Amino acid sequence: MTSKDQIDLFNLAEVVTPAPSADFNPDLIPTSAKVPIPPGTYSSMDEMKVHCNQCQRCDLGATRTHAVVSRGSIDAPIMIVGEGPGQNEDETGIPFVGKAGQLLDKILDAVQLTEADVFICNIVKCRPPGNRTPTTDEMEACRPYLLEQIRMVDPKIILLTGASSVKGLTGDKRGITKIRGEWLEWDNRLCMPIFHPAYLLRNPSKEKGSPKWLMWQDIQKVRAKLDEIRAQG
Ligand code: URA
């Protein structure tokens, strides 16, 4: 191996687009939102990633650099669902790698949650231009991918970061300050709305009652629930 090859091994910015599996049917690549994606379509996240990178179910397909599918563990007990990729995520194909993602990692680390404990994804897999909020149509077009991710990971707990994530998955349109920190049930699954880390970056106070302080209460609740679930076996 040359020294250049060795250096390339550490090139984390390089994005590897997975090769399709042998039984992969390219005719099923969704070219519009009219192409159905029935439950059970994908047997791995890599297989789904191939489709997402060619997907034209909504207009976001025209402007993305990379579809942003997931990071973390497929066996994770906790799934974290963001709103949509930003610029850093669009460039790398990996969710939550920018400033908000770094804060999210710190929050998880504070309650000893590692990449083995979490699976991180977004409501929409492609970056909305200028980081605008994804439209209802975009969220709807992308929803089958999210449902497939939930089916494959089968998480015990789903954390929904911010109002768009809550609306995108559950349809609940209430403001995040109203519903954060409370468990809710969706499709027989335990979900908790929490603040989006980008909101915490804009509100740095740690005073009692501040968004950061509330997030600390919420994430400790999540940690306690996971411990409780694990103790039940
Ligand atoms: N914000 C999100 O909601 N998702 C990301 O992946 C990055 C920033």
Image: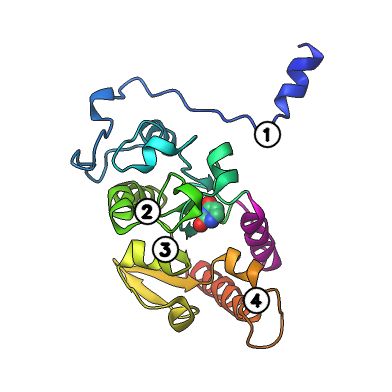
**Residue 92 placement (x, y as % from top left):** 58, 38
> In what quadrant of the picture does the N terminus appear?
top right
Query: What is the secondary structure assignment of the residue under circle 4?
Result: helix
Q: Earlier in the sequence, mark 4 or mark 1?
A: 1
How far is mark 1 from mark 3, CA to CA?
Answer: 28 Å
Query: What is the secondary structure assignment of the residue under circle 1?
Result: loop
**Residue 117 placement (x, y as % from top left):** 57, 56
Number of marks in the rendered image: 4
Instruction: Choose between 17 and 176: the one closer to the eye.
Output: 176
Residue on which the image places disc 4: 212
Q: Residue at x 45, y 80 (%)?
A: 182
Q: Residue at x 61, y 78 (%)?
A: 211
Task: Report the side of 9 relative to 187 (left or right).
Answer: right
**Residue 40 placement (x, y as % from top left):** 27, 42
Residue on which the image places disc 3: 165
How far is mark 3 from mark 4, CA to CA?
Answer: 19 Å
The residue segment tinted magenta is: 98-115
Q: Earlier in the sequence, mark 3 or mark 4?
A: 3
Give yes or no for residue 102 being in the magenta stretch. yes
Query: What is the secondary structure assignment of the residue under circle 2?
Result: helix
Task: Report the side of 160 relative to 100 (left or right).
Answer: left
Any atom of ligand 1 within 8 Å of the CB at mark 3? Answer: yes
Q: Amino acid at mark 2?
A: Ile
Residue on which the image places disc 1: 12
Q: Are marks 1 and 2 in contact (CB under 8 Å)?
A: no
Q: Earlier in the sequence, mark 1 or mark 3?
A: 1
How far is mark 4 from mark 1, CA to CA?
Answer: 30 Å
Q: Residue at x 38, y 36 (%)?
A: 62
